[in-house]
Amino acid sequence: MTGTSSTPASLKVATDAWEALFRAQVAVMRQITALPEFSKLSMREYDVLFNLRTCPGGKSRLVDLNRHLLISQPSLSRMVVRLEDQGLVTREPDPEDQRATQLSLTAKGLELQQQIGREHVKHLYGLLGTALSEEEFLELNRLSTKLRAAIQ
């Protein structure tokens, strides 16, 4: 893994920055998971619906979807069964691999994802919107994207 900088960070600076980023994420996630919109679905269930909505064609194989989530494959499989039982997702055979299935949102799943998403965006902005300036949020986005690209 290499960055684009000519001078690599020291071990201490890199680990201190990671620790700060991780602690910030923990603090934010604790607040987010307590928001009222997540009484309808858990944050992880919502994340599955959100990621399905953003997949090309609105469909994804389980293994591909799992690459975007912080959840084990067996846990995701069980969660998909629960979401399917609630009428939020559906499975169909993958036209390119008959051994696999593709997941997609049902109309009910899409409606719920959008409803929770609208509330989530408002609450997220209320929680974080004044923590940084517009320029700082743009820089945070740029740096986060750069970090993710460096490890992929």
Image (spheres, helix red, strand yellow):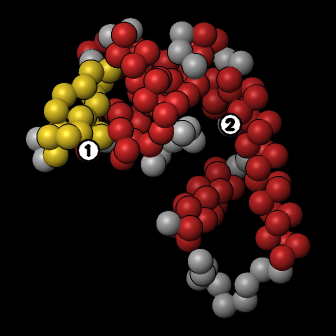
Q: Is residue 48 above or below residue 15?
A: above
Q: Is residue 43 above or below residue 69?
A: above
Name which residue lies at 26% across and 44% down.
Answer: 56
Name which residue lies at 49% across and 18% down.
Answer: 116
Residue 101 in percent (x, y) is at: 24, 35
Residue 143 visible? The answer is yes
Picture quadrant of residue 54: top left
Q: Residue furthest left?
A: 95
Report the mark closest to the observer, 2 or 1. Answer: 1
Picture quadrant of residue 11: bottom right
Which one is in front, 37 or 152? 152
Residue 80 in percent (x, y) is at: 40, 24
User: Circle 1 sits in a helix, a strand or a loop, which is it?
Assistant: helix
Residue 1 in percent (x, y) is at: 59, 77
Q: Is residue 56 left or right of residue 11?
A: left
At label 2, the amino acid type is Gly
Q: How many marks?
A: 2
**Residue 56 numbered tag:** 1
**Residue 129 numbered tag:** 2
At label 1, the amino acid type is Pro
Name which residue lies at 68% across and 26% down.
Answer: 32
Q: Earlier in the sequence, mark 2 or mark 1?
A: 1
Proximity of marks 2 and 1: CB atoms separated by less than 8 Å? no
Residue 77 in percent (x, y) is at: 43, 29
User: Circle 2 sits in a helix, a strand or a loop, which is it?
Assistant: loop
